[in-house]
Image (cartoon, rainbow, N blue to C red):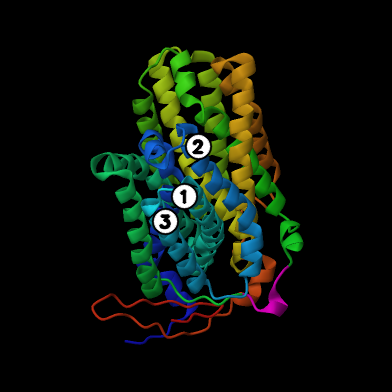
Amino acid sequence: MTLSSTSSQVKAGPLPWSGLLALSCAAFTAVMTELLPAGLLPAMAHPLDVAESRIGFLVTAYAAASFLAAVPLTAALRGLPRRPVLCAALLGFAVSNTLVALSSSYALTFAARLLAGAMGGTLWAMLTGCAARMVPAGRRGRAIAIVLAGITLAMSLGVPAGSALAGAVGWRAAFGALAALAVLLVGWIRLRVPGFPGEPAHARVPLARAALRPGIRPVLSVTLFLLLGHQVLYTYVALFAGHAGYGRTGLLLAVFGTATVAGIWVTGVLIDRYLRPTLLAALALFTGVLLTLGAGARAHALLVGAVALWGVAFGGAPTLIQTALVDASGPAEADVATSLQTTVYNAGIAAGSLTGGVALDALGPGALPWTALPPAVLALVTVAAARHHAFPRLRHALAPEAKVLAEPVPVAVACPAGDHVARRSVADGEGQ
């Protein structure tokens, strides 16, 4: 069945849930692939004949490859249609996880993790841009929240479930399951994610120019400050809890993970109308949590409650920042801007872990909340100050350079038999 639509029909119609959920599952798969080895250190060490610490380096390899590959790969692939690039990245995950599942060589496993990291850097640059182009500007925040919910679910539920699966059937089967999931997602995305074109050569904005666009640098700064502050404490939360006399670290992490789900749900409700105040509230809440943990963590009820509020704040903040980035760049340049953010995100994680480790060695676990506090305050102050382009009181419907894409182009959307009719107007062209 074939239909065409207008922009008003898009605004009135339902969200393209199937396509957005496919992208969310892709985010879930990427995070699971990245973090699963951290929960399998003893199980993987003996078969690969290495120390447990070297299994930890498999997570580092992924992060390093993602950090290094995001910008150059995104720049190289800007002219290609988005859907084939997404599918290729997922197939790269499938190959990587298959190699890890079958490998008895640490060197081969390490190389497979580098491949996965490069695919992750590419994937993250595409996901939010595709989500933003699938919906009208006024619903962009909710679409991005749905896609990024895959991260929260992977961290709070997926990684523990993957570790449990590995305990029941073996770690190789767990990586094999991730490979199979990636292949299934390729089919889902081919059916349900529109075939957005790449950027024509004459329309491509240089990376340096995209980075200098008003609003981009404050958003990237907030990303760096938030991740640095968060990671200072989160990396060593078990040691901090032990210092406070609370030995149930697993329960504390479960509270944090569950609260992040609540945070992203609240964000999805508020983001399209109240992005700036919601982000300010989340960062203010995070700052308050750090003050509470620094002053009163030995009161265990206060500790658990503060960690829950931390999860609520952090669950929503990355989605709010990501949406602000897309607003500042425009959907047409969201891939490039997101590749820059991917690099900054990983830099914040690395810097936070390093800073926390230095503080831990020099001052002890009790200093961790106070060490995390300055970057958290800087993130809050940056959002408060950047009220014009990065985090405006009234959100821009489209960045100036994206207005050229605003004229609706009726397109035919082929719908598989038995599914609901999808009514979309894609300003920059859609292909199946």
* Residue 289 point in image, percent of width and height: 51, 26
* Residue 287 point in image, percent of width and height: 57, 29
What's the residue at 62%, 15% (across, down)?
363
Q: Earlier in the sequence, mark 1 or mark 2?
A: 2
- Amino acid carrying label 3: it is Leu
Task: Residue 192: name its quadrant.
Answer: bottom left
* Residue 341 point in image, percent of width and height: 62, 52
Q: What numbered label is drawn on residue 380? A: none
* Secondary structure of residue under mark 3: helix
Relative depth, front residue between 240 and 302: 240
Relative depth, front residue between 113 and 132: 113
Relative depth, front residue between 424 and 124: 124
Task: Residue 70: name its quadrant.
Answer: bottom right
Q: Does any portion of residue 348 appear in the rendered image?
A: yes
Give the extent of the magenta segment.
199-205
Q: What numbered label is drawn on residue 54? A: 2
Eyeballing the image, is 8 above or below 224? below
Residue at mark 3:
99
Residue at mark 1:
109
Q: Earlier in the sequence, mark 2 or mark 3?
A: 2
Eyeballing the image, is 53 above or below 148? above
- Amino acid carrying label 1: it is Thr
Circles 3 and 1: CB atoms closer than 8 Å: yes
* Residue 271 point in image, percent of width and height: 49, 51
Task: Residue 405: name its quadrant.
Answer: bottom right
Relative depth, front residue between 184 and 111: 111
Mark 2 to mark 3: distance in Å? 17 Å
Mark 3 to mark 1: distance in Å? 7 Å
What's the residue at 42%, 39% (across, down)?
260
Q: Does any portion of residue 269 appear in the rendered image?
A: no
Left or right, residue 395 beside residue 7: right
Mark 1 to mark 2: distance in Å? 11 Å
